Amino acid sequence: MNQPALAVRCENVVKTYVAGGQKVTALRGIDLDISTGELMMLVGPSGCGKTTLISVIAGILDQDEGSCEVFGEDFLHMRSRDKLGFRARNIGFVFQAYNLLPTLNAAENVAIPLIINGVKRQEAQRMATQVLETVGLGERVGSLPSQLSGGQQQRVAIARALVHSPRLIVCDEPTSALDHETGHHVMALLKAVALHRDRALVIVTHDARIFDFADRIAQMDDGRIVKVVDSATAL
Amino acid sequence: MNYIALKMLMGDRGKYLGIVMGLTFASLIMTQQPAIFLGLMTRSFSFVSDVGLPDIWVMDAKVQFVDDIKPMQDTELYRVRGVSGVEWAVPLYKGLLKARLANGTFQTCNVIGLDDATLIGGPPVMLEGRLEDLRRSDGVIVDIDGATDKLAKPPASPGGKPIPLKIGDTLELNDRRAIVVGIAKVTRTFQSQPVLYTTYSRATTYAPRERKLLSFVLVKAKRGEDLQVLNRRIRETTGLAAYTQSEFKKLTYNYFMKNTGIPINFGISVTLGFIVGAAIAGQTFYNFTLENLRQFGVLKAMGAGNWTLLRMILLQAILVGTIGYGLGVGLTALFGYSMRNTILAFKFPWQLLVFSGAGVTLICIFAALISIRKVIQLEPAVVFKG
């Protein structure tokens, strides 16, 4: 049987910000490997660098030192246009605050990544409707975000992250705005429909109730990964 | 992405209408005020426009504009007729005289005295009566606006409507009787005074006794004659000033531009309209972009480039600009149409559409630029901030 491929390889990643005139080192030499077919959770206290790390992994922030390869490509060495194209094709996003465009309905929101990738609007909306059916929102394709519950909005966001079949999905606190039961449903859905052997999921979370969904958990503190464990009980 | 841009724009009805209203206001001010200005300025030379037949206007060398009458001796007419290249030359009297109305009040009128033989220089449109009726004893032709307004007879009963002058009614000009023999339509003049047409000889009897009474000599050039050459010849031969119709209009227009506060007043209105429109539309559009910054960040994170976002913002700006411009221009046209029968001056040439179009475009470019700057500087990582 084939070994899973490496989706993400971070080596000695360092990222420093200047905030309020002071240098703040958010990442202090991160080493992390994530394989395809794996759901990796990044956990740790606020300000430990989780969000900075997924920003670097997703290619929306450049590291200062080290390398971070996603499917063998380091964003740092890409031209701006190539980076955009790579991100548009290969990365799906699920955000804490859903970040759905409030004036677009569910199908139109889900269709955005396809449109960015050059798919015609009608075709993109047809594909978006199919993915919405997969996440159980086939009846709500025409609903605006304001007409959907928090759980439904997050399911739309998951559909949006999946619609263009990316190879890496990064999720930032996907359950923090949801109650326990809804959060559990969302995670079950995410794992069921998003995770497969060619795709990796990276989830940043504080929510200990969802740790059981992880294949591995990387605990961070003060810009470093302090340990990587296989189950929540080992934390 | 165009569809997404439009949905983003129109989805926020309040902001969308705010931007459109700002641009409509700017466009309205940038067309309505100049239209009134142009209407006024056109009125300054409306009399010259109404007298279409002559090629050249001859007058005293010191005349600065059409109402700046500096009378010449009648003999100047014969000197002009003597210049080679002149087909014909006729005299024209133009002066302000007081008419005594039926109720005993006085009204200053613009009295035009036409050549007795040819009646050249008469009103462009006769509504009642005929131009030739001026040859009848004491005959005058009154313009319709004057007849229905300033020269109208008092109402039959108190509080009623004034009774318009009609053919057969009489006026008193400088203690002499004038009988209305016709009603004409003329272009309103700058001062909007009633216009009375009569013959040259009769006009000189109405006018106060002066040694010189000839206001203008109207000249027709011989066929094939170069008007500039003939102008120069008339000037050199007579020492008078000679202008083609368009030159005389320009002279009058320039006088009003240089010597009245009209251009400054209207210029200030238009500039203020532009600034207020730009401020309203620019700030609302900028706020709209700021409020959507997170959404632009999401699009950026998903792989939409700066160029794509720039195109989206430009499309939004073009759309609101086009709608605002259309509404503003439409309202101006509606304003002009509704005021067509009033004393208000209004002229709306195509150049004004171009001018206001350029103004609205500038506002939209300004609004889009400040918004685009913000979006281009946006870090897509903003989307991970709760």
Image: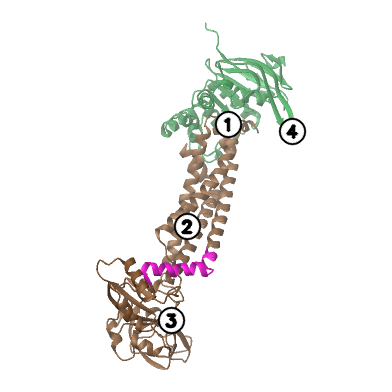
Chain colours: A green, B brown
Label 1 environment density (alpha carbons within 10 Å; few <14, some 14–19, many ≥20):
many
Q: Which of pointers 2 and 1 indicates the residue nearer the eye?
A: 2
Instruction: Give the overall secondary structure of the magenta segment.
Output: helix
Query: Foreground: B269 or B246?
Result: B246
Name the outermost residue toward the top: A1
- Is B325 above or below relative to B299? below
Q: Amino acid at mark 3?
A: Asp
Q: Secondary structure at mark 1?
A: helix
- Is B224 above or below relative to B126? above
Q: Which mark is residue B149?
A: 3
Do the residues at pointers 2 and 1 share their chain?
no
Q: Secondary structure at mark 4?
A: loop
Which stretch did the figure color magenta? B242-266
Distance of label 3 from label 1 (alpha carbons):
74 Å
Distance of label 3 from label 4 (alpha carbons):
76 Å
CB atoms at circles 4 and 2 under 8 Å apart? no
Chain assignment, label 2: B
Q: Which mark is residue A21?
A: 4
Picture quadrant where residue B197 is located: bottom left
